[in-house]
């Protein structure tokens, strides 16, 4: 008796149209999942463990809340503001990405069609070989991690209710502008500014916005600023590991295809991250006599961030050079410059997001303007004959474009983040009350990270002995731990 194969499993059917490439679609969904895992549980674990014990729950929840809030805002209006039809040279038209007809159609970024100066077609519209649903979700997890990274600057004192307002506002008025301008077909995209996978859109914007928000929210309590040890270094490493391995989807998914460019991006990502981690660790050993585990994590992050704007566009030797610089330049700004600039010390950037993301992201964008290899550029970029400065020709102009593009992202985030924070202040305080700052998670959430002892009872110092993350310990010299 003949069997009928369900439509969903037929090679050519309504569920598998001629334009669908199942390999590309599979890789795009895997990449999106890897990037999502960087946030949940990656940054949830990292934030919850790298902070003082009394802020573990609050820090982890800020990341979890932001992820959920971004998902809903993204599909309701923000996706099309980032990748839809042009409204302004830096912004797309808002609209929902929820309808069936829209989501099952072939993915297309309508504003990306690129023309020569004489009006003839240079590069056709980006139309990956998978459905819009895959594109919407892939770009969604990028938006989510950007807001979560920004949150690292205000851990340990931002009012959680103010954070709940801040997330959709910043996503709408800041992230979507950078995404459309550089990726969705905005003026920087067509001018030829290179941002392969988010060095500017994600890292530079989150670092600058984080520093700006930290200024407006104000500092942590004096006790927390003076002593803020990680409550679980091993879990910090677990979160960092998810971040590192998830970067295969972060950079490997941005060619919108499982192609050779994607392979180059993944390899370069790991080369740069490993180099940067080693350089940062050795600098800690040379100047502080001991290798800092937290410092190694910071070095890993700066390497991942630095390679991001040029991951699929540079050669392996360039990835090593970028790793050397990403392990040393942000280390220098964090450990030396930060401590010598009074105005920078007054801004309490809890996890040093400005250094690990803004400095490393801008550095990566500039270095991409130097090292972008012509043949690799031709595989990916809409502006043909693009090249880095070391390859001559128009490379010098590309280097300048990178600086201007970074300047736009910096300026926009400084202004818009400030406006958002000022407006929220009229509705609700940005900073927690003094009582909440003193108590921590129990006062804010009624929950504690390590609250249970014995047979399910709450910790009581009169019964269980004294323990506090303010306990006096032997002072050690370590790298980033002095900042974090």
Image: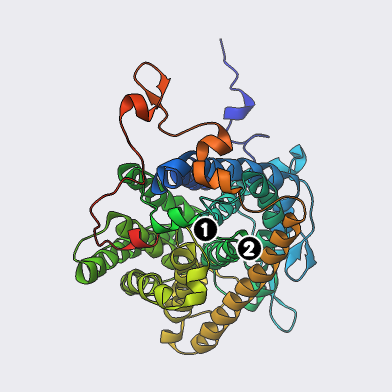
Name above or below for residue 67 compared with residue 304: above
Point out which mark residue 254 bears: none
Q: Where is residue 323 in the image (x, y as percent from the top left)?
A: 34, 69
Quadrant containing the N terminus in the rendered view: top right
- The quarter of the picture where residue 120 lies is bottom right
Front in this rendered view, residue 333 or 313: 333
Work out which residue is located at the far top of the displayed protein and give it: 1
Q: Against 284, is 438 above or below? A: above
Residue positioned 58% across, 49% down in the render: 144
Residue 19 at what x, y percent from top left?
63, 47
Mark found first going from the N terminus, 2 or 1: 1
Few, some or many C-alpha atoms within 10 Å of disc 2 (few <14, some 14-19, many ≥20)? Answer: many
Q: What is the secondary structure assignment of the residue under circle 1?
A: loop
Q: Residue 81, how many percent across, how many down? A: 74, 57
Q: How far is mark 2 from mark 1, CA to CA?
A: 11 Å
Q: In the rendered image, which residue does mark 1 sit on?
A: 153
Q: Can residue 18 be seen in this view?
A: no
Say what secondary structure mark 2 lies in. Answer: helix
Colour scheme of the rendered structure: rainbow
Residue 108 coordinates in the image, percent (x, y): 68, 55
Estimate how packed mark 1 is, as few (under 14), some (14 to 19) or many (20 or more) residues with alpha carbons within 10 Å.
many
Say if residue 222 shows up in the picture. Answer: yes
Residue shown at 61% from the left, 59% from the top? 217
Residue visible at 67% across and 64% down in the picture: 417
Asked if 473 appears above or below 407 in the picture, the reply is: above
Judging by the rendered image, the residue that carries numbered circle 2 is: 216
Residue 110 horizontal side relative to residue 315, left or right = right
Seen in the image, is 185 located left or right of residue 461? right
- Where is the C terminus found, in terms of image quarters? bottom left
| Badge count | 2
Left or right relative to 295: residue 145: right
């Amino acid at each position: 008796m003949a069997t009928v194969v369900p439509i969903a499993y037929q090679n050519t059917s309504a569920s598998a149209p001629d334009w669908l490439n199942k390999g590309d679609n599979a890789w795009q969904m895997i990449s999106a999942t890897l990037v999502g895992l960087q946030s949940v549980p990656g940054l949830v674990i990292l934030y919850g463990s790298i902070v003082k014990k009394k802020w573990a729950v609050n820090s982890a929840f800020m990341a979890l809340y932001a992820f959920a809030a971004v998902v809903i805002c993204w599909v309701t209006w923000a996706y099309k503001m980032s990748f839809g039809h042009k409204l302004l040279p830096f912004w797309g038209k808002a609209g929902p990405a929820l309808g069936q007809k829209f989501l099952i159609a072939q993915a297309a970024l309508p504003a990306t069609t690129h023309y020569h100066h004489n009006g003839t077609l240079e590069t056709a519209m980006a139309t990956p070989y998978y459905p819009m649903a895959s594109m919407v979700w892939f770009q969604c997890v990028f938006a989510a991690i950007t807001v979560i990274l920004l949150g690292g600057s205000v851990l340990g004192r931002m009012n959680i209710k103010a954070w709940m307002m801040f997330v959709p506002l910043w996503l709408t008025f800041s992230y979507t502008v950078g995404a459309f301008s550089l990726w969705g077909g905005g003026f920087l995209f067509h001018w030829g500014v290179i941002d392969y996978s988010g060095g500017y859109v994600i890292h530079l914007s989150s670092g600058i916005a984080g520093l700006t928000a930290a200024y407006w929210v104000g500092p942590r309590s004096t006790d927390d600023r003076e002593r803020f040890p990680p409550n679980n270094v091993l879990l910090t490493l677990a979160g960092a590991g998810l971040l590192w391995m998830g970067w295969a989807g972060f950079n490997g998914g941005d060619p919108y295809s499982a192609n050779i460019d994607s392979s180059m991006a993944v390899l370069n990502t790991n080369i740069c991250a490993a180099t940067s981690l080693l350089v940062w660790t050795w600098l800690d050993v040379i100047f502080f006599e001991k290798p800092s585990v937290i410092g190694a994590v910071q070095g890993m992050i700066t390497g991942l961030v630095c390679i991001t704007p040029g991951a699929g566009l540079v050669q392996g030797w360039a990835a090593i050079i970028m790793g050397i610089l990403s392990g040393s330049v942000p280390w220098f700004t964090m450990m030396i410059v930060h401590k010598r600039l009074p105005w920078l010390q007054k801004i309490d950037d809890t996890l040093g997001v400005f250094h690990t993301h803004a400095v490393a992201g801008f550095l990566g964008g500039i270095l991409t303007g130097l090292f972008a290899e012509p043949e690799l550029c031709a595989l990916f970029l809409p502006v043909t004959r693009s090249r880095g400065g070391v390859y001559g020709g128009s490379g010098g102009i590309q280097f300048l474009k990178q600086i201007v593009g970074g300047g736009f992202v910096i300026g926009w985030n400084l202004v818009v983040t400030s406006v958002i924070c000022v407006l929220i202040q009229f509705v609700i305080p940005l900073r927690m009350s003094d009582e909440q700052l003193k108590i921590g998670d129990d006062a804010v959430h009624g929950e504690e990270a390590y609250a249970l002892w014995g047979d399910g009872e709450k910790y009581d110092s009169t019964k269980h002995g004294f323990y506090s993350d303010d306990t006096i310990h032997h002072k050690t010299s370590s790298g980033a731990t002095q900042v974090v």
